[in-house]
Amino acid sequence: MTETVAIRLAAILATVALGWIAARAGWLGRGAAGRGAAGRDTTAADLLGKAAFHLFVPALLFRTMVRLDLSTMPWRLLAAYFVPAVAFTLLVYAWQRRRRPARAAEAATRSVAIVYGNGVQLGIPMAAALFGEAGLALHVALVSMHGLVLLTLLTVLVESDLARASGGRTHWQTLRSTVRSTVLHPVMLPVLLGLAYQLTGLGLHPVLDQTLQGLGSAVVPLCLVLIGVSLAAYGVQGSLWGAVQVALLKLLALPALVLLVAHQGFGLQGMPLAVLVMMAGLPVGSNALIFAQRYQVLQAESASAIVISTVAFAATSTLWLAVLGASGLLSG
């Protein structure tokens, strides 16, 4: 692991710790809107989660989609990553559904944690430090499609589960409810609007662009603080083993599948293959907690999985680089 990545890991964990301290010290207020583990107040966590999900993340997604240049995307590389990633998502989701979760949104919400990595605040400096400008360009292409592909799929799955769970509906009513909820979802709507606006070829007005950029730049610190606040609000009791399982699947199983499919199925090797594997092996991203907050399920597990996987990434990133080097795939 490079010094740059190690410093970024430490900064992420320090920001999470500040959120935990702020919540425990009552700096964010003490309300009575909700109670988590051991009767802890969850008001601040709920408020931050709603702000992230309904304001800051939509601004980031809309601006990202507007600025996306579809004509320059490395489509073969993207297919080599997202074919196994989507397959893995569906397998994890089906496995979670077979376990008959107590709440309808649990299967898709846990799937978010297992497949959606921290591609921005940790992935970008990692790619720049390990692979230089060329590798960073490939990583950014993956990140730009990350939300569009995986969040779209997971949003459809969770809204479909919720529509079915409501009961007393025909198949047509369930489908109509799923489509409506998916399109109007705070994640999907800005993505769709951003893509539609991008296709018009019109640029963003400087005032609007600066507004969206300011809101989007707040996503990273806000979500990291939210992780700490959620840990303070919900605790880890009863969620630790689940969080460890999520972290293991994210850090080990997904990159192994991407390595196999990208190399054997798409013939990739060398730096492009390494970029894909390291992208797949990133720790759990903050979208896992945002989804958990949105649907009021698995908040403690999601927050714990983010912290555990981020700490463990120091070891697993070194492992995957060693695997790639020992197999000779980095020299291709």
Image (cartoon, grey):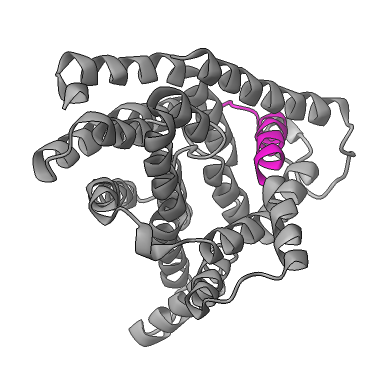
Task: Examine the rendering and report whether any part of residue 243 can be seen.
Answer: no
Q: Please tell me whether residue 181 is drawn above or below residue 303 in the rendered image.
A: below
Quadrant housing the N terminus:
top left
Q: Judge from the rendering whether residue 254 lies leftward or rightward of residue 35; answer left or right.
A: left
Considering depth in this image, is 324 or 176 the residue closer to the camera?
A: 324
Q: State the image coordinates of residue 133 (x, y, percent, origin top left).
A: 43, 34
Q: Position of residue 259 (x, y in %)?
A: 21, 34
Q: Residue at x 63, y 55 (%)?
A: 57
In the displayed structure image, the side of residue 207 where residue 161 appears, left or right: left
Rendered-image quadrant of the C terminus: top left
Locate residue 26: give its quadrant: top right
Residue drawn at x 41%, y 66% as measured from the top left: 156
* Residue 327 rendering spot, x and y as whole percentages: 14, 18
Single out the residue that lies furthest toward the front. 133
Q: Is residue 259 above or below residue 44?
A: above
Front one among 201 and 31: 201
Residue 260 seen in the figure: yes
Residue at image x 22%, y 29%? 270
Q: How many marks?
A: 0
Rendered location of residue 99, percent (x, y) = 32, 46
Q: Which residues are magenta?
A: 219-237
Figure check: 178 above or below 247: below
Residue 90 among those drawn in magenta: no
Prevailing SS of the magenta stretch:
helix
Q: Residue at x 24, y 34 (%)?
A: 273
Seen in the picture, residue 18 relative to 198 is either above or below; the reply is: above
Viewer-proximal residue among 128 and 233: 128
